Image (cartoon, rainbow, N blue to C red):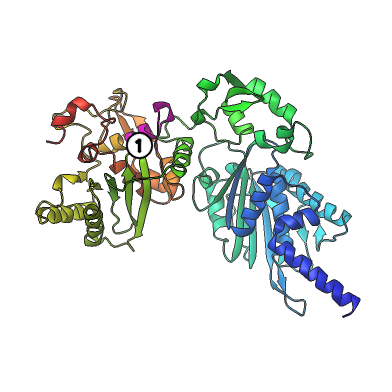
């Protein structure tokens, strides 16, 4: 074997190693030291189609995004033995303004391109003021301002390997993301990086959805801050964070600290952050809008508790059932054992209701365990399943309790049979209908300030659904939840998981399993639904 052949084989082997490990390419070719959290983001993008990164100030979000863009540009194309490109690659960088593209994104790319050259690695293509262009018209990186009025700008980004990196993504309209989504075919990637300035919009929703790999770059955990010295030039430093702690936070005692408030310890003292500190330093969303039913943090805490709990018995459960029908994809069963929600079972209906099959699955659960109750939304398709379950109970010769099958009608009054109002746990609020009462019961159950021990399984669509639901007061002071159609329009799907859980808080279901009466006046127990 000649020396040239050996060198070609060694180069091919090294290039193959870079393809398998983008972080290796970043270290060896670009000469960059990323911190562990940034490296995790790189790995996530390498292996997942959608990655969302919210970040505190100067935490390196745009820099790691630039590293990812260069990796994708040079490590995804493929050639045949003749040197002909058989898999092309296109990378698009975009932001709400020209300034963000030209003064932030492209300069980061330029520094990496030139740094590689200084280290002896000449990357293909010509570096220009707004792009990198190679001799192949189907292989390039380009940056431009996102324009929600010009969806045609995205039409040229069909390729075998396609990447879209969107910085300051909270400033871009949903219509633009709809156009980008249309290009996510083949080996495609979309990466969102942003400061969490708002709780609404596509970027904010990406941090709630299980479709996305989600990250938060917290300035308090930056290496320069943790070590109190400059390890990574350009990243946020200790002195800057110290100034913001002193000016944007309120000192508290450890006894006052609450996870739900994002309270934190810094240099041995405890602090409560302002919304400005929450966004700029912690990389957290601002306190949820007053009309949002469930703050995301409450759900995150419940999911953390779930991972540490072991369920000893599968008896004494409430099953919340939301039955799918025409035009809906999934029937959802929620299994709640006290404060522990074991799972949400989803079954695709194919747009066709199957009352007998759904009823059979519930009967099987009730026969296999003791102390089960099922609460069914009987407005619509659930009515058929409810009717069948009542028939089965009547035919069971007492083996199945008819009283354990509850008709949950969202439109009915939130009152006892005696006409008294059902209230929240404080006795302060009353409700426009049963739907508002049940949804608020979930809120009370999750509220950390009320000593919540709620446990929810991670994953699924619950977080995304719960944090999109809005509430308000009627003129008579009663609480009402916004129409389901309004929520569905924002989400793109129904709140099936949330509805299934809400059903488990129906007062009659709680009584059926001998549970707590926290969500209504216990003095009304005897007259409730006699």
Which of the pair 457/129 is nearer the observer? 457
x then y, percent, for residue 262: 54, 30
Residue 513 falls left or right of residue 54: left
Looking at the image, which residue is at 70% across and 25% down? 242
Q: Is residue 157 above or below residue 411?
A: below
Residue 355 falls left or right of residue 460: left
Residue 403 in sight here:
yes
Q: Quadrant of the N terminus?
A: bottom right
Classified by dominant secondary structure, the portion drawn in magenta counts as helix
**Residues packed near mark 1 inside 10 Å, few (<14), some (14 to 19) or many (20 plus):** many
Say how many tags the image has.
1
Residue 230 falls left or right of residue 52: right
Residue 329 in sight here:
no
Which of the pair 457/292 is nearer the observer? 457
- Of all residues, the one furthest to the front in this rendering is 312
Q: Is residue 10 above or below residue 257?
A: below
The residue labelled by disc 1 is: 442
**What stretch of residues is rendered in magenta?**
440-454
Looking at the image, which residue is at 59% across and 23% down? 271
Q: Quadrant of the C terminus?
A: top left
Which of the pair 508/366 is nearer the observer? 366
Magenta stretch encompasses residue 159: no
Magenta stretch encompasses residue 452: yes
Looking at the image, which residue is at 33% across and 58% down? 327
């Amino acid at each position: 074997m000649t020396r040239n052949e050996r060198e070609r084989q060694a180069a091919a082997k090294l290039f193959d190693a870079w393809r398998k490990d983008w972080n290796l390419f970043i270290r060896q070719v670009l000469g960059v030291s990323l911190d562990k959290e940034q490296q995790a983001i790189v790995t996530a993008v390498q292996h997942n189609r959608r990655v969302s990164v919210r970040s505190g100030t100067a935490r390196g979000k745009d820099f790691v995004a630039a590293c990812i863009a260069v990796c994708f540009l040079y490590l995804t194309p493929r050639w045949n033995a003749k040197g002909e490109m058989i898999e092309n690659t296109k990378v698009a960088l975009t932001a709400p303004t020209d300034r963000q593209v030209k003064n932030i994104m492209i300069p980061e790319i330029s520094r990496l391109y030139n740094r590689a050259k200084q280290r002896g690695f000449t990357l293909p293509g010509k570096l220009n003021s707004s792009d990198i262009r190679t001799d192949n018209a189907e292989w390039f990186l380009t940056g431009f301002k996102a324009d929600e009025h010009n969806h045609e700008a995205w039409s040229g980004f069909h390729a075998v390997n396609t990447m879209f990196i969107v910085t300051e993504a909270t400033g871009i309209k949903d219509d633009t993301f709809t156009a980008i989504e249309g290009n996510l075919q083949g080996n495609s990637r979309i990466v969102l990086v942003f400061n969490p300035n708002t709780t609404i919009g596509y970027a904010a929703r990406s941090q709630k959805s299980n479709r996305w790999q989600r990250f938060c770059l917290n300035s308090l955990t930056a290496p320069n801050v943790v070590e109190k010295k400059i390890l990574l030039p350009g990243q946020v430093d200790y002195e800057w964070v110290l100034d913001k702690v002193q000016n944007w936070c309120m000192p508290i005692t450890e006894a006052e600290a609450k996870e739900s408030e994002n309270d934190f310890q810094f240099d041995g003292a405890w602090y409560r952050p302002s919304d400005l500190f929450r966004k700029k330093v912690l990389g957290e969303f601002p306190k949820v809008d007053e009309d949002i039913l469930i703050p995301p943090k409450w759900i995150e805490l419940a999911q953390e508790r779930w991972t540490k709990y072991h369920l000893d018995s599968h008896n004494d459960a409430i099953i919340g059932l939301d039955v799918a029908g025409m035009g809906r994809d999934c029937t959802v069963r929620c299994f709640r054992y006290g404060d522990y929600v074991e799972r949400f079972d989803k079954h695709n209906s194919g747009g066709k209701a199957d009352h007998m099959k759904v009823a059979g699955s519930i009967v099987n659960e009730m026969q296999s365990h003791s102390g089960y109750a099922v609460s069914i939304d009987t407005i619509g398709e659930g009515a058929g399943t409810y009717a069948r379950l009542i028939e089965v109970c009547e035919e069971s010769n007492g083996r199945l309790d008819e009283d354990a099958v509850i008709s949950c009608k969202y439109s009915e009054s939130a009152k006892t049979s005696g006409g008294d109002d059902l209230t929240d746990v404080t006795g302060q609020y009353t409700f426009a209908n049963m739907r508002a009462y049940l949804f608020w019961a979930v809120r009370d159950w999750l509220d950390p300030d009320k000593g919540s021990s709620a446990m929810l399984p991670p994953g699924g669509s619950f977080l995304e659904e719960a944090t999109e639901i809005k509430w308000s007061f009627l003129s008579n002071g009663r609480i009402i939840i916004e129409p389901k159609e309004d929520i569905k329009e924002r989400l793109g799907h129904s709140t099936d998981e949330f509805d299934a859980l809400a059903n488990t808080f129906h007062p009659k279901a709680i009584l059926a399993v001998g549970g707590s009466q926290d969500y209504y006046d216990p003095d009304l127990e005897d007259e409730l639904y006699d």
